[in-house]
Amino acid sequence: QAPVLDVETLILTYPSLEGLLEELRRNGAACAAPDRRHGLTACSVWRTVEKRYLELAVEDRLPATFEVIYGHAWKAPLPKKAGEIPSPAIPLRAAEPFG
């Protein structure tokens, strides 16, 4: 079977830019662009970002759009040899109990 991708777009709103940025940090979000800046961002740049983002507010809430992509894939079954018992995907000695 071919891999299946489902896409869902979520728009969440936040009472402040600080709240939005804090949630992004907690979720581990980061810019993955290879040409992104690696140094500190100047205060004047942050003030400009905040000013422009606040212009997007609707009813005193700041929107943030997230695109969630769900991927489903299946591995083709291995050919069975006579008398062979298939091994688990995770060796039993490495498995840890839940809880």
Image (cartoon, grey):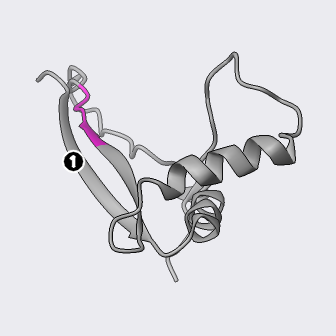
Residue closest to the far left? 1
Residue at 76% in and 40% down: 45
Instruction: Name the spot of residue 17 as percent of width and height, x first.
Output: 59, 64
Q: Nearer the viewer, residue 10 or 76?
A: 10
In the image, residue 70 sits, relative to residue 16, either above or below, namely: above
Instruction: Name the spot of residue 79 as percent of width and height, x first.
Output: 21, 20
Specify the quadrant that holds the N terminus. top left
Q: Nearer the viewer, residue 19 or 29?
A: 19
Please tell me whether residue 86 belongs to the stretch shown in magenta.
no
Instruction: Name the spot of residue 5 as percent of width and height, x first.
Output: 20, 33
Residue at 21% in and 23% down: 76
Q: Residues within 10 Å of mark 1 (few under 14, many from 20)?
A: few
Residue at 58% in and 58% down: 24
In this picture, residue 59 sits left or right of residue 79: right
Q: Nearer the viewer, residue 61 or 95?
A: 61
Instruction: Name the spot of residue 26 as percent of width and height, x first.
Output: 63, 64
In the image, residue 51 sits, relative to residue 98, either above or below, namely: above
In this picture, residue 51 sits left or right of residue 59: right
Residue closest to the far top? 35
In the image, residue 66 sits, relative to residue 19, either above or below, namely: above
Q: How many marks?
A: 1
In the image, residue 91 sits, relative to residue 72, either above or below, namely: below
Secondary structure under the numbered disc 1 in the rendered image? strand
Q: Which residue is mark 1?
A: 8
- Range covered by the magenta-colored residues: 69-75
In this picture, residue 49 sits left or right of residue 99: right
Q: Nearer the viewer, residue 12 or 75?
A: 12
Residue at 70% in and 16% down: 35
Residue closest to the far bottom? 99
Amino acid beneath label 1: Glu
